[in-house]
Image (spheres, coloured by chain):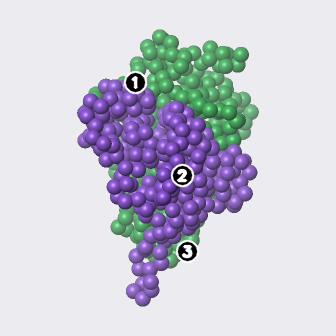
Chain colours: A purple, B green
Amino acid sequence: MNEPAETSEAGTSSAILLRVSGLKRAYSRPRTSLWRKPEPLQALRGVSFELQGGQSLGVVGESGSGKSTLARLVMALDRPSEGRVELLGRNLHLLSEQELRAARRDFQMVFQDPYGSLDPRMTVEAIVSEPLGTTHEKLSRPARRQQVLSVLDQVGLRAQDADKYPHEFSGGQRQRIAIARALITRPRLIVADEPVSALDVSVQAQVLNLMQDLQRELGLSYLFISHDLAVVQHVCDQVIVLHQGEVVERGTPRKLFSAPEHPYTQALVKAAPRVI
Amino acid sequence: MALLEVSNLTINLQTHRGRAQAVRDVSFTLERGATLGLIGESGCGKSLTALALMGLLPEHAQVDGSIQLDGQELLGLSERQLCALRGNRMAMVFQEPMSALNPVHSIGRQVAEPLRLHLGMSRAQARARATELLERVGIAQAAQRLDEYPHQFSGGQRQRIMIAMALACGPDLLVADEPTTALDVTVQQRILDLLQELVAEHSMALVLISHDLGVIAQNAEQLLVMYGGTVVESGMTEAVFARRAHPYTRGLFAARPQLHAAEGTVRLPTIAGAVPELVDLPAGCPFAGRCAHTQDECYVERPQPRTLHQPSMAAPASLASWRQPHVARCLYEQVLTAGART
């Protein structure tokens, strides 16, 4: 197997970071009858796309379209029925457990709910440094703390926030903590599943700006899952539209949302509420 | 006389950090057949205002002011009197249809309940009427599905069932608190279209609460923009959206990414800071501190509502709601508007 090509630092890399090909995932459903075989639920029916370093790919679609299944497979939290997920040239689902654990430093996730995704009994320092425990060689406590403080600074939180607990923060600040936790392993890819849809409009803008600043500074790639077309257009370079587990349309957001071709994309664009 | 007249509604809540004025001096009127949009971010008091209309505030809440439905004062009514009104003259649709529906009763029974309770229908009558209602809100094969339970329906269908329950007794006032926030955009539009049809059909008054400017823009003729328990701007939707007199309204607009925005908009303009907790609100303007134009007076002096535009009285009297004046509460509105124009 080839060594993953070491790409250059921050942003300049245009090599393929993530390649997803022919991805399928079927879930078994309960029997509806004793005499009939249970029908599997086809959550993903052959999804393929590529994501370049430093770029953002938006995934839009309704609930049930397979967005979250896709995120779980890319994060190697679940195994596909068919197809492959290659990050930096390695097929994630063929790695041994140990290799996968080491590989996880390259891809991290930010979840939708800033209230449910942070353990209320852990300090911010413990939350943010947790990914280091599994993916990095043993670090001394001061070195850990130093890294925590530096990512907190990057996401716009203060050093004294490290010793606080999640309940002391607002929704927007919690999402910053979640982003800091994702950043601490210096990942190349962040999978963000509806990262701003639980936030108030004024705070949503702050978090989106932060995500874009970090992308510019660190050359991050985002797999950005959202149902909000305007947010996707603002953040992403490319978009795929998922419908019933299939990619029905892809392209730049501007082209896709101004001249949608597939009837489903047309329906999505038409339904997006807009001001005047 | 308007169907719903709310004047100087003030709600105080006892929190563990002390007394919080959660709703301050809210006044509005709403006619039959009209939709009022309530817009604002979490903690701005929009849901509490809705609960106050329905008489569903927590017991420790202190309420002042007046809420009149068709001339009847609602504040101070006993629970028994309120029960006779709720579900009958006024009804509410909640955000999360799964938790608002009872999982252990069939949907037929839940839709029929207000019919039996308020209209005294027999079991069979109520069942027949429930079928009609479910068909009206777009549940296919309603007659066959009456005995199914909430978990057998999708999110959009559940919200339709909620709407059927709310409509059962033909209420005068319908309050919908973020009715589509938990739904997909395509489903959202169908539910909002349904609500609009029903408002016109039954000449109900609808109070539509949302944090989404687009939802309000497309569905409400008049609106209140709330911040920190205060109505900072109000009027006809078109007028408010065109002028955006209050800095908070302007901030909300700017912070929202726009579909089909001009190319090259890299950063979104943000509103500094976060929505303050109600206990921490400044004594003066609630937006003081977060507002880019804050002056010293803003912290001290509470801005009074100022009428910016009084629509002509030429509109026909039956459409009284079309004459809502455009009002803003900002000490420096004139200065800011003048600045924005130059």
Residue A115, percent from left and from top: 37, 43
The amino acid at mark 1 is Leu
- Where residue B59 appears, as percent x and y from the top left, is 30, 41
Q: Is residue B191 visible?
A: no
The dot on residue B281 is 1
Q: Are marks 1 and 3 on the same chain?
A: yes
- Which one is in front in this view, the residue at disc 2 or the one at disc 1? 2
Q: Nearer the viewer, residue B252 or A144?
A: A144
Tell me what residue is drawn at x 59 percent, y 31 percent. Answer: B267
Asked whether B154 or A167 is in front, the reply is: A167
Can you identify the residue that label 3 sits on?
B141
Instruction: Using the image, name the chain to which the residue with label 2 belongs.
Output: A
Residue at the image position 35 percent from the left and 58 percent from the top: A97
The answer to whether tags 2 and 1 share a subunit is no
Disc number lying in front (3 or 2) = 2
Front-most of A48 and A167?
A48
* Mark 3: secondary structure: loop
